[in-house]
Amino acid sequence: MPETVIRRATPADAQALSAIGRDTFVETFGHLYPPDDLRAFLAASYGLRKTHADLADPTKAAWLVEEDGKVVGHAMAGPCDLPHDGVAPGDGELKRLYILAAHQGGGAGSRLLAQTFDWLLKDGPRTLWIGVWSENFGAQRLYARHGFEKAGEYEFAVGQIRDREFILRRAAGS
Ligand SMILES: CC(C)(COP(=O)(O)OP(=O)(O)OC[C@H]1O[C@@H](n2cnc3c(N)ncnc32)[C@H](O)[C@@H]1OP(=O)(O)O)[C@@H](O)C(=O)NCCC(=O)NCCS
């Protein structure tokens, strides 16, 4: 069995976090978008400049999942910036949760989720939010098991494409 290690990403991990961010997004959702749109989105969301900024932001946290020393997944959490009227100052959001396909199904995703929730709730109960693609049924099942319910929808833009995205919420203390 490979040894799976989950650790907080530091500024020194910017390159690794940027690379696993791009790789997992392309693997999961790359087929949905025209190449030019995808390229521009990846640069803006997962490029080194953005990744350095994310890692320097004290209100956010990121994690790397390593199996036998190879990075196979990542997560990011921070303040909620989803477009929903119910979002209040102080609410938290799971922003990213990805494991490379070849390493899924072994429990790493659930462990990663538990670590992000521990961090999000380290100062006490608060409402948590997640945005998830409307057709990502596996992830929706996982979040439902953790008490998240659909609270709304929005359009997630990648270039010209608009994806239907569900907004999930779990009330503080539930
Ligand atoms: C969601 C994800 C991080 C879970 O990681 P994992 O290591 O497979 O998770 P675990 O083995 O701990 O748990 C499996 C649960 O994750 C979900 N899951 C499994 N495969 C999945 C997949 N390909 N896509 C989405 N969710 C999946 C299911 O709810 C599953 O539970 P089940 O087996 O009872 O149905 C991982 O599947 C993944 O990276 N998927 C693609 C990216 C993604 O959809 N991220 C969420 C964006 S909001």
Image (cartoon, rainbow, N blue to C red):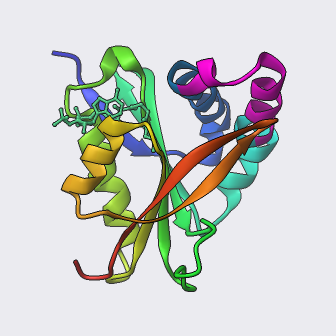
- Ligand 1, what quadrant? top left
Residue 38 lies in the magenta-colored region: yes
Task: Please tell me which residue is depicted at 32% across the width and 54% down the height of the picture.
Answer: 115
Quarter of the view holding residue 109: top left
Task: Please tell me which residue is depicted at 38% across the width and 81% down the height of the picture.
Answer: 126
* Residue interval drawn in magenta: 29-44
Q: 6 or 80, which is in the foreground?
A: 80
Residue 102 image offset from top left, x and y in percent: 35, 14
Name, please, the residue furthest toward the left: 1
Residue 57 image offset from top left, x and y in percent: 67, 63
Horizontal side of 95 relative to 40 (left or right) equals: left
Residue 130 image offset from top left, x and y in percent: 45, 58
Quadrant of the rendering where the N terminus is positioned:
top left
Quadrant of the rendering where the C terminus is positioned:
bottom left
Q: 56 or 89, which is in the foreground?
A: 89
Q: Is residue 55 visible?
A: yes
Q: Is residue 111 above or below residue 58?
A: above
Q: 6 or 120, which is in the foreground?
A: 120
Residue 121 image offset from top left, x and y in percent: 35, 73
Q: 103 or 145, which is in the foreground?
A: 145
* Count of numbered marks: 0
Residue 158 lies in the magenta-colored region: no
Q: Is residue 53 above or below residue 109?
A: below
Q: Is residue 152 above or below residue 35?
A: below
The rendered magenta stretch, by its main secondary structure, is classed as: helix
Q: Is residue 63 visible?
A: no
